[in-house]
Image (cartoon, rainbow, N blue to C red):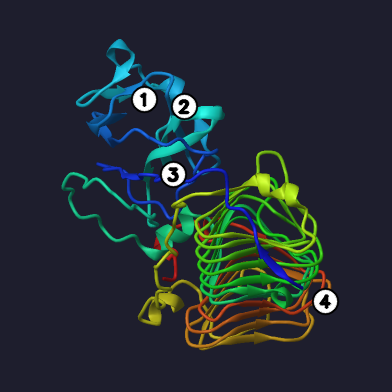
Amino acid sequence: MGWRRGEEGVSEVVATTLLVGVTVLAVAIVAAIVLSAPQPGEIPHAAIVAKNESGKFGLAHEGGDPLRVGEYRIYVADGGGLVDETGNFSSPEGGVWGIGEDIAYNGGSTDFHRVIVTTLVGGGGEVILTEVRLRGGGGFDPDPVKPPEEDPEEPEEFIDFVVNENVFVYGSALQFSGGNVNGPGATVIITGGLVTTDANQGASINVSNIYFDGDVTLSSGSASLGSRDEPGSIYINGSLTLRNGQRHIYGDVYVNGNCDLGSVNIHNKVYVNGDLTLGQDVINFEGGAHAYYTGTLYTLSGVDTSKKQYCTHNTTVPGFAMPDLEIPPVKSPDTWYTSRGYAQSGDLVSDMKIFADSYSSTSWKSSATNVTIIAHTGDITITGMGGSGVTGVFFAPKGKVIFGGNSLEGVVIARDGFFVTSGGTQVTFKNIGEYITDPEDYPF
């Protein structure tokens, strides 16, 4: 099939992303979201710093151009989507937010995961001026403003990350032969990529936030990504290729490589730090969905050229960083476990606690709930369950978790990945705090 170079997007702009200094907020794992349309030739420059004094959250203008009321917006997120909170910030004196002036937040909770300040541009679009993050992550800042000196932050503990970010699966691979993975509001982190066979052709990963540290290639079937009910962000530290079949992608998608789109319904934004190719298979941009790319737009022969109106070239797009927390070893000594009722072996039954080199249950068992299984040097294998299921915490810091049964609910943390071998299996996220209520009893 022949290739031909398509036209690039409507206009190019040098987008200056300004680094925001933060006094009390820790850095977020969640990456920047751009609320954009075709951008103007000039964008205001402003250094905005988040402040929290005497329990009052606010934003301070510390340099650059003045910002007039009505020409900027302020969005916040407390774990869900971004909400326009501009009206809950005080107005600057005279309607102009200039250097040295603070504006205070007069809304409710300030447990923000993100704070974004945008400027309005022609055609009703917006461009990000600054972003504040809470934990981890990063972005491409081509011309950052150096923030004020801050005290070094304490490194985040792995368990805090798992609890606060609702981590569901953390491992090098996810191979799923079952029905669906369900986790609205949850996070899946795969320290590798994803191919069609990993998702059983048509299984959906219905999880709000997904990280892939590698290429994602779905070349057939209807495997979908993201949560329709609570769309978040999908981060791909590699290239994204979607071909044949028909699938849905929910949430903003960040691709640190090239993107080849085909046979897909896109429901949010796609940011491509590379080339964008439109294939001749059906591509639907639903609602306000749009694609932004930094490289070249290509179209395959026979493609519906009307889809190019949903694709815009930008000099830069928001970036991200993969979470870099290593899976910790188990607690020691072994007596820590025995004193809390852990056994070294046993049949799979409700409320069991296992601490062993590895654990294997390969024959039919009745459904078991609230189990905690820790394989400190090997794998956890639970197969042959048939119509039975299991709920709990499954921790294999040096191995993998293999499951075959009707359903699994809980948290899976396994360095070498999570493998579901049975068809029709439903996997559902529950926070680790649902099973281990006292943080002192976390096994890592």
Q: Disc 1 or disc 3, which is closer to the eye?
A: 3
**Badge 4: few (under 14), some or many (20 or more) residues near its Cα, within 10 Å?**
some
**What number is the disc on residue 386?**
4
Give the answer, above or below, for where 179 lies relative to 397. Answer: above
Residue 136 falls left or right of residue 172? left
> Looking at numbered disc 3 in the image, what kind of residue is underneath it?
Val
Residue lying furthest top in this view?
94
> Looking at numbered disc 4 in the image, what kind of residue is underneath it?
Gly
**What number is the disc on residue 105?**
1
Q: Nearer the viewer, residue 294 or 195?
A: 294
User: Which residue corresponds to the image point at 40% horizontal and 78% vertical from the top-left?
Assistant: 329
**Residue 260 x, y percent position in the rendering:** 65, 64
| Residue highlighted by disc 3 | 13
Residue 413 falls left or right of residue 268? left
Residue 53 in sight: yes
**Residue 347 x, y percent position in the rendering:** 67, 82
The earlier-in-sequence mark between 4 and 1 is 1
Q: How far apart are marks 3 and 4 (CA)?
A: 57 Å
**What number is the disc on residue 85?**
2
Image quarter hosting the C terminus: bottom left
Q: Nearer the viewer, residue 256 or 203?
A: 256
User: Which residue corresponds to the image point at 62% horizontal and 53% vertical from the top-left?
Assistant: 7
> Looking at numbered disc 1 in the image, what kind of residue is underneath it?
Tyr
**Badge 2: few (under 14), some or many (20 or more) residues near its Cα, within 10 Å?**
some
The earlier-in-sequence mark between 2 and 3 is 3
User: Which residue corresponds to the image point at 67% horizontal and 44% vertical from the top-left?
Assistant: 309
Residue 112 in sight: no
Q: Disc 4 or disc 2, which is closer to the eye?
A: 2
Q: Kindly check if marks 3 and 4 are in contact, taking CB atoms under 8 A apart as contact.
A: no
Q: Kindly check if marks 2 and 3 are in contact, taking CB atoms under 8 A apart as contact.
A: no
